[in-house]
Amino acid sequence: MKFLTSLTIACFALALTPAFGAEKESAKKTCCEKAAAEGKDCTHKCCVAAHKDGKSCVHCNPDKQDLKLKKKDKKADTKAA
């Protein structure tokens, strides 16, 4: 009987784990994403230098999230014009 109870509790715990993990992933934003959410440009020296060259700062944005933000901004600008 204890085994069945322990197994049931373990199943519920595993079922709830992804829900809590999703919150942590959404809380992790890069400096460029945070600045874009405020409607500003990132002011980190490494990001500013990379953006001038049309590149992504590998240190702050390893998955090139900042370039995805730039594409969204360009689409929004063309729709507004």
Image (tube, helix red, strand yellow):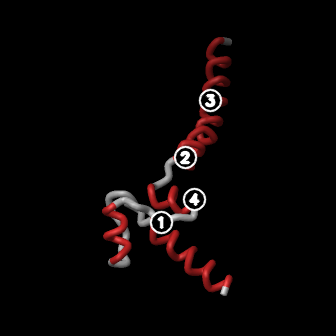
- Of marks 2 and 1, which one's residue comes earlier in the chain? 2
Q: Mark 1 points at which residue?
A: 41
Q: Name the residue under label 2.
A: 27
Q: Where is residue 23 in the image (x, y as percent from the top left)?
A: 59, 43
Of labels 4 and 3, the one closer to you: 4
Q: Which image quarter: residue 52? A: bottom left
Q: Name the residue under label 4.
A: 38
Q: Which amino acid does label 2 sit on?
A: Ala
Of labels 2 and 1, the one closer to you: 1
Q: How far, Cα to Cα, is label 2 from label 1?
A: 20 Å
Relative to 48, say whether 3 is above or below: above
Q: Is residue 4 left or right of residue 71?
A: right
- Of marks 4 and 3, which one's residue comes earlier in the chain? 3
Which residue shows up at 52% across the image and 69% down it?
69
Q: What residue type is labelled 1?
A: Asp
Helix, strand or loop at label 4? It is: loop
Q: Where is residue 4 in the image (x, y as percent from the top left)?
A: 66, 19
Q: How far, Cα to Cα, is label 2 from label 3?
A: 22 Å
- Of marks 4 and 2, which one's residue comes earlier in the chain? 2
Q: Nearer the viewer, residue 64 or 42?
A: 42
Q: Name the residue under label 3.
A: 13
Of labels 4 and 2, the one closer to you: 4
Which residue shows up at 67% across the image and 24% down it?
8
